Amino acid sequence: QVPLVESGGGLVQAGGSLTLSCAASDHTLSPYAMGWFRQAPAKEREFVAGISRNGLSSGHTDSVQGRFIISRDIAKNMVFLRVISLKPEDTALYYCGAARTGFTERYFINPKEYDYWGQGTQVTVSS
């Protein structure tokens, strides 16, 4: 088991920004590609952003392009999601996921590829 802990969510006004963090105490994240997903009430969990093991490859879903940026600090063993220009439709529970892989420059969009998940951090955007 790799216990992932997300933090940084909150209530913000439309147009605001947040930085979400994901950490794994006592476990290295180096064998894992990482991803951020979100789930709004009555909706499926959806891919937001993914990043490869070495941090050199990343991708974001179309609806957040230019507003969200995923990054990872390998030395600090953490993954981040910087979110700006938030919209009410971004309101959701945001999850961090870890996908064990032998590929250093791949990230994954399908949640079924992920082995571990955190409990989520809530982001609520008011209009």
Image (cartoon, helix red, strand yellow):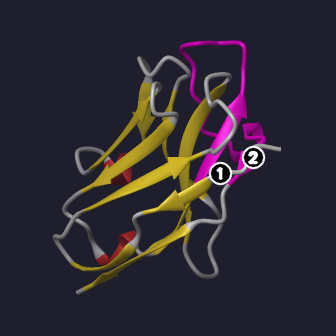
The reply to whether the C-beta atoms of the residues labelled 2 and 1 are less than 8 Å apart is yes
Q: In what element is the residue under mark 2?
A: strand
Give, as a three-letter code, the residue at label 1.
Leu
Q: Position of residue 71 (x, y in %)?
A: 38, 35
- Res 104 quadrant in image: top right
Please identify the quadrant where the N terminus is shown.
Answer: top right
Viewer-nearest of discs 2 and 1: 1
In the depicted view, which residue is nearer to us: 105 or 53?
53
Residue farthest toward the right in the current orientation of the protein = 1
Residue that badge 2 annotates: 116
Q: In what element is the residue under mark 1?
A: loop
The residue range painted magenta reads 96-117
Please tell me which residue is depicted at 57% across the width and 36% down the height of the picture: 34
- Res 58 quadrant in image: top left
Which mark is drawn over residue 4?
Answer: 1
Residue farthest toward the front in the current orientation of the protein = 26
CA neighbours of label 1 inside 10 A, class few (<14), some (14 to 19), many (20+): many
Report whether residue 68 is seen: yes
CA neighbours of label 2 inside 10 A, class few (<14), some (14 to 19), many (20+): some
Residue farthest toward the bottom in the current orientation of the protein = 127
Please tell me which residue is depicted at 41% across the width and 31% down the height of the picture: 73
In the depicted view, which residue is nearer to us: 76 or 85?
76
Q: Is residue 7 left or right of residue 42?
A: left
Q: Position of residue 122 (x, y in %)?
A: 49, 74
Please tell me which residue is depicted at 45% across the width and 25% down the height of the picture: 75
Sequence order check, earlier mark of 2 and 1:
1
Give, as a three-letter code, the residue at label 2.
Tyr
In the depicted view, which residue is nearer to us: 55 or 2?
2
Q: Is residue 34 magenta?
A: no
Q: Position of residue 52 (x, y in %)?
A: 53, 24
Q: Position of residue 40 (x, y in %)?
A: 55, 75
Which mark is drawn over residue 88?
Answer: none
